[in-house]
Image (cartoon, rainbow, N blue to C red):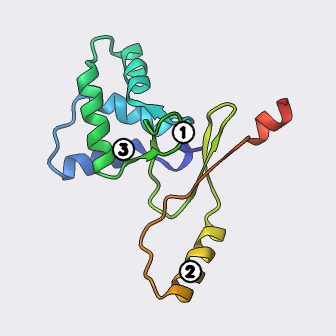
Amino acid sequence: MLSKSINPEDWLAALDEGGFRVTTVQETLIDIFAHSEYPLSAEQAWDAARQSRPKTGRATVYRMVEKLESLGFIRRVHGYQGCSHFVPTLPELMMLFICLDCGRADYLDSQPLGDLIQHSEHASGHHITDSRLQLFGACADCQQNA
């Protein structure tokens, strides 16, 4: 589950420290992204925000999604419904799994990825500073229900 490691208060504090004015609508959007178990598009975030704040503007949501992505709080999921969906970014190196049946997202144990990166650095001489490994398949729940 994505939301176990995400604390929306950390995002709000970082925005405040960065000098960004944070509105109640933006707080709502941060909460939506931080607690979602599924990759969300800006449109889906807008729909969710309007559940509690009906007058939320679409442009406000799209600007906030751009801001959260540029600050590294959320990351784009490539290869999933047109690369227009986002999940929270974790501070540590993690592998992202997306269930193609139900859409649920989960971060997986990163040790195998860390070992692969370390081996690759040693073998190639390159210094690897970031990774965006995304895995797709069927989650355990969907496999049981199949």
Quadrant for the C terminus in the image: top right
Of tags 3 and 2, which is closer to the observer? Answer: 2
Q: Amino acid at mark 3?
A: Glu
- Side (left or right) of 23 relative to 44: left
Quadrant for the N terminus in the image: top right
Q: Amino acid at mark 2?
A: Ser
* Dot 3 alpha-carbon crowd within 10 angstroms: few under 14, some 14 to 19, many 20 or more: few
* Contact? badges 3 and 2 (CB < 8 Å): no
Residue 43 appears at what percent x and percent y?
A: 39, 24
The first of marks 3 and 1 along the sequence is 3
Q: Residue at x 36, y 44 (%)?
A: 9
Q: Residue at x 29, y 30 (%)?
A: 62
Secondary structure at numbered mark 3: helix
The first of marks 2 and 1 along the sequence is 1
- Kindly identify which numbered label has been placed on residue 37: none
* Residue receiving disc 2: 120
Of tags 3 and 1, which is closer to the observer? Answer: 1
Q: CA distance from mark 3 to mark 2?
A: 36 Å
* Contact? badges 3 and 1 (CB < 8 Å): no
Q: Residue at x 24, y 26 (%)?
A: 60
Residue 15 appears at what percent x and percent y?
A: 24, 47
Secondary structure at numbered mark 2: helix
Q: As displayed, is residue 5 above or below residue 63?
A: below
Residue 107 appears at what percent x and percent y?
A: 59, 52
- Kindly identify which numbered label has been placed on residue 80: 1
Q: Amino acid at mark 1?
A: Tyr
Q: As displayed, is residue 54 above or below residue 19?
A: above
Of the pair 6 and 121, the residue shown nearer to us: 121
- Kindly identify which numbered label has been placed on residue 9: 3
